[in-house]
Image (cartoon, rainbow, N blue to C red):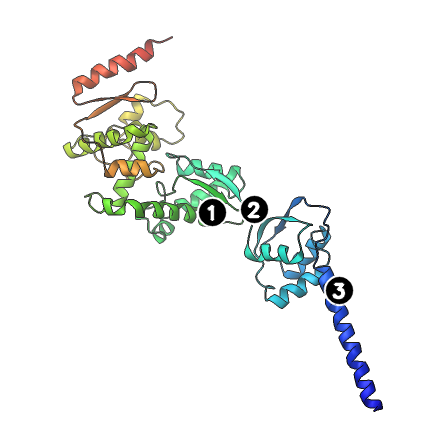
Amino acid sequence: MKLSWIAAALLGALLLSAGSAAAWWSRQLQPASLADESVRLFVVERGDALGHVARKLESERFIRNASALKLLARWRGDAGRLRAGEYDLSSSWSTRTILDRITAGRVRTYEMVLPEGIRADEIGLRLEAVGVVEAEDFLAAVHDADFARSLGVEADNLEGYLYPETYRLSRDLSPRDVARILVEQFDRVWVEIEPTALEQTMTRHEIVTLASIVEKETAVPEERPLIAAVFLNRLRRGMRLETDPAVIYGIPDFDGNIKKKHLRDASNPYNTYKIAGLPPGPIASPGIDALRAVLEPAESEYLYFVSRNDGTHHFSRSYREHVNAVNRYQKRRRRAP
C-alpha cells in the first residue's frame, strides 16, 4: 500500500509538472504585446540558424521567449525551414503566426512597374532603385547566353523577353531569379498568341524583334497594326526598315540627338538605314498589343510614316506622298519658334 501511495504521488507530481510546463509554454507563445499593433521590419539573413533568429526576435521584442519559439519550431519540424528575407512583423501577433510567416517566406515585396517599350538596362536601373538587385548584376544575367537558352530564349541575351508588367519583388531574389520571373511572364503571354504565331513564316525571335520596334515607334494603340503593316510591307519588298529607334539602340551612350553620321554608320548592326532586314534582336520589351500587331497587322499598302508631332503619325503609300508629309510636319516643326 505504501509503494502504491508513493507511485501515485510521483505520478501526480509528474502530471502537475507537465501541466505547469504546458501552461508556461502556452503563455510564452502568446503575443509579446497586445498594446503595440505596429508592423515593423525584421530581417532573416541567408544562413541564419533557428537559435539566432529566435534570440533576435526576442531581443527586438517580437516574441516573448526565444526558447518557446525554438521548441515550437522543432515540434512542428520547422527548424530547418526558415526562409531568408525581409518580413513585416508585429509584437501583437502570436509566436505561431510569426513562425508561420517566416517558414512560409511571406517576405516584404516592392512594386516595380515596367512599361511597354522599356529596355533591359532601364529595367536594371529600376531594380536597383527599389533595392532588389544591382543594375550591373542584372544586366550580367540578361546578357548570359547560356542562361538565356536555359530559359528557352533562342538568342544570346534576354532583351525583348523581359515582359513589361507590374511586379512585386522581394530583396532576397538573385539577378537570375528576377530575370527568370520576367521571362516566365513573357512565356505566359506568348501562350495566348502562339497559335497565331505558328501560322507565320517568321520565327518567334523575329516576331519579338519586330514587335519591339513597333512598340518604340508609337504609343498610340490604334496605330500599332498600321506601323506593323508598314514594316512588313517593306520587308516583303526588300526595302530597308529605316527606323530610328533601332539605330539608337545600337549607339553606345546615346545622348538623345540622332545625327546623320549615326544613320551612315554601317558598323552599327542595328542601323536599319544601312542594313536590310530585321536587326539582330529586339530593342526593347514589347507588350501583348505590339506582339499581336505583328501577328495581325492592318490590311494596308502603306510603306512610310512620319510623326505629326502630336504623338500620332501620317501614313503614305508612295515616296512622293511621304516627302510631302515630311515637308508638312517636320519642316514646319523646325520653323516653329
Q: According to the image, label 3 marks what residue?
A: 24
Q: Are marks 3 and 1 in contact (CB under 8 Å)?
A: no
Q: Residue, x 57% and y 61% (percent of image)?
A: 81
Q: According to the image, label 2 marks what residue?
A: 108
Q: Residue, x 33% and y 9% (percent of image)?
A: 335
Q: Is residue 268 visible?
A: no
Q: Earlier in the sequence, mark 2 or mark 1?
A: 2
At label 2, counting other C-alpha atoms closer than 10 Å, the crowd grade (few under 14, some 14-19, many 20 or more) is some
* Percent of width and height locating residue 117: 37, 34
Instruction: Report the number of discs.
Output: 3
Tell me the kind of residue under disc 3: Trp
Q: CA distance from mark 2 to mark 1?
A: 17 Å
Q: Are marks 3 and 2 in contact (CB under 8 Å)?
A: no
Note whether 126 is above or below 108 in the view shown: above
Q: Residue, x 16% and y 27% (percent of image)?
A: 301
Q: Closer to the observer: label 3 or label 2?
A: 3
Tell me the kind of residue under disc 2: Arg
Q: Residue, x 65% and y 45% (percent of image)?
A: 40
Name the residue at the right extreme: 2
Name the residue at the bottom extreme: 1
Q: According to the image, label 1 marks what residue?
A: 175
* Percent of width and height locating residue 282: 32, 38
Note whether 110 is above or below 78 in the view shown: above
Horizontal side of 109 relative to 145 (left or right) equals right
* Percent of width and height locating residue 246: 31, 31
At label 1, counting other C-alpha atoms closer than 10 Å, the crowd grade (few under 14, some 14-19, many 20 or more) is many
